[in-house]
Amino acid sequence: MKSWLFILVAFVSAVVFQSCNLFAPVDPLPPVLSKLEVVDIKRTEITVSGTIDNPDSKNDRQEKKSGVIKEYGLVYGTASTLDVQKDKVIKLGETPGQTPVLIQNQKIAGLMSDTRYYIALYARNEGGGIAYGEVLDIKTTLIPPAVVTRNSVKVARTKALWYDLDTGTPLLTADDPKKDITIDFFVISARGTVLEINTANKLQFANLDLADYDKLTYLDLVRITNYGSMSITYVFSNLTDNTVIAFKTGEGRFGKWRIEDVTANDITMSLITYEN
């Protein structure tokens, strides 16, 4: 009899406890954010990936009180303590249709070179307020690597030559979308061979004449202020050999191009194009 009485008391206590717990207040939870994964680091750009998810609520009431994600994105700055109110923010979305939210290959552009940045995911939901992911500590590069290097390459001379400065290769047709420049050759009586260079695909260049090609650095190219799309024309002679042209391609790459020699059969040139 006593054992049954004990069981009954325990059962009633459990029911009472559960009933009280059912009406007890619950705290809302903030979203759950992963640490960012570094995909790529450049001079003025960092690419990252990560995930954003709803919190692991203990019950339906807590899940409802936490609510759905209302805003999410990236926050970054040059100080380790990040705050969406004072630091730069890239807002990536609102109220996602499903979770987890995958942030893939997100670029942060317009950064300063050789500078340490702190980056994190942030998200806010209806009830749990704003949350920050683990902060990523990363430094941009000083000078980008050369994506193309060509030294004294001879290219067969035709009536016209189309060239892609992003890859350092001649093209087969004038309507190739990768075309950066058009090079035309013609002869002026009593003056000699004329080389005319025109831009395409938003490329801009600057004629540096007989600049020292080997001492011309990436930072020198970035500092040039007179890039334009006007054509450049040379009447070739010994005085115009090793003419240097600085350029910025439509894809945003800076580079330098040296025209070393022009003959009846080919044009010899060197090229360095830097990754952007």
Image (cartoon, rainbow, N blue to C red):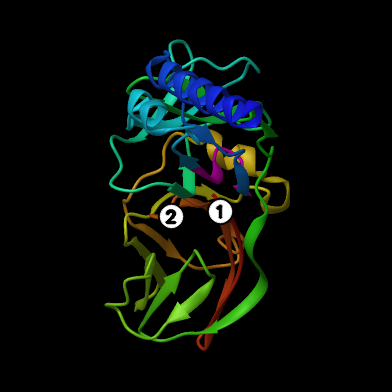
Three-letter code, disc 2: Thr
Inspect the magenta stretch and tell me whether residue 43 lies in it: yes
Precedes in sequence: disc 1 or disc 2: 2
Inspect the magenta stretch and tell me whether residue 205 lies in it: no
Q: Report the residue marked by disc 2.
A: 249
**Of helix, strand and loop, which one carries label 2?**
loop
Residue drawn at (60%, 66%) of the image: 238
Residue drawn at (47%, 40%) of the image: 52
User: Where 137 sits versus 141, above or below?
Assistant: above
**Of helix, strand and loop, which one carries label 1?**
strand
Q: Is residue 109 left or right of residue 218?
A: left
Q: Report the residue marked by disc 1.
A: 255
Alpha-carbon span between mark 1 and mark 2: 8 Å
Q: Quadrant of the N terminus?
A: top right
Tags 1 and 2 touching, CB below 8 Å: yes
Direction front: furthest residue = 1
Q: Does the image show residue 193?
A: no
Residue in front for this viewpoint, 18 or 150? 18
Residue drawn at (51%, 14%) of the image: 83
Residue in front for this viewpoint, 52 or 10? 10
Residue drawn at (41%, 69%) of the image: 195
Residue 241 lies, in percent from the top left, at: 60, 64
Q: Magenta region's main secondary structure? A: strand
Task: Tell me which segment is drawn in magenta.
Answer: 40-51
Q: Crowding near pointer 1: few (<14 within 10 Å), some, many (20+)? A: many
